[in-house]
């Protein structure tokens, strides 16, 4: 039996997916909904963005935030690696 979700909930799920970069699987596990629903809501939001400049700005912001989060995570990993390498080299010198 299909469930009906309100628009606020749908937008929350779309934000989790597009802004925070959460995987569809993690959203399904947390909220117990179908994969098709999540994909449909994301597609509807993208279509809405093409017709509504305000939604387009929100979508662009979500994409930028997601990109920056990925970049920040990569920089954290590189920084951790460099710290470990520096510690290793410091041991070798002593």
Image (spheres, rainbow, N blue to C red):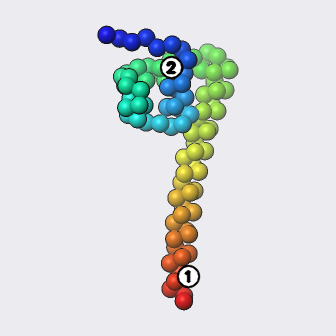
In the rendered image, the residue lying farthest to the bottom is: 94
Instruction: Give above or below for 11 relative to 64.
Output: above
| Residue 48 x/y as whole percent | 57, 17
Q: Determine if residue 16 is in view.
A: yes
Looking at the rendered image, the quarter that the C terminus falls into is bottom right
In the rendered image, the residue lying farthest to the left is: 1
Please tell me which residue lies in front, 29 or 50: 29
Disc 2/disc 1 C-alpha distance (Å): 52 Å
Q: Determine if residue 47 is in view.
A: no
Disc 2 and disc 1 in contact, CB within 8 angstroms: no
Please tell me which residue lies in front, 70 or 30: 30
Query: In the drawing, what numbered circle is on residue 10?
Result: 2
Figure label count: 2
Query: Which element carries disc 2, helix, strand or loop?
Result: helix
Query: Which element carries disc 1, helix, strand or loop?
Result: helix
Looking at the rendered image, the quarter that the N terminus falls into is top left
Quarter holding residue 51:
top right
Query: In the drawing, what numbered circle is on residue 37?
Result: none
Residue at 35% from the left image edge and 11% from the top image edge: 2
Query: In the drawing, what numbered circle is on residue 90?
Result: 1
Residue at 67% from the left image edge and 20% from the top image edge: 53
Residue at 57% from the left image edge and 39% from the top image edge: 66
User: Relative to residue 85, is residue 26 drawn left or right?
Assistant: left
| Residue 87 x/y as whole percent | 54, 76
Disc 2 or 1, which lies upstream in sequence? 2
Q: Pointer 1: residues within 10 angstroms few (<14), some, or many (20+)?
A: few
Q: Pointer 2: residues within 10 angstroms few (<14), some, or many (20+)?
A: some
| Residue 55 x/y as whole percent | 63, 21
């Amino acid at each position: 039996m299909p469930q009906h979700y309100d628009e606020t909930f749908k937008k929350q799920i779309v934000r989790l997916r597009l802004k925070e970069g959460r995987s569809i699987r993690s959203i399904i596990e947390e909220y117990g909904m179908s994969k098709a629903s999540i994909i449909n809501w994301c597609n509807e939001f993208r279509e809405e963005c093409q017709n509504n400049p305000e939604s387009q700005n929100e979508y662009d912001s979500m994409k930028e935030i997601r990109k920056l989060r990925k970049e920040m995570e990569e920089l954290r990993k590189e920084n951790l690696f460099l710290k470990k390498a520096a510690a290793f080299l410091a041991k070798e010198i002593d």
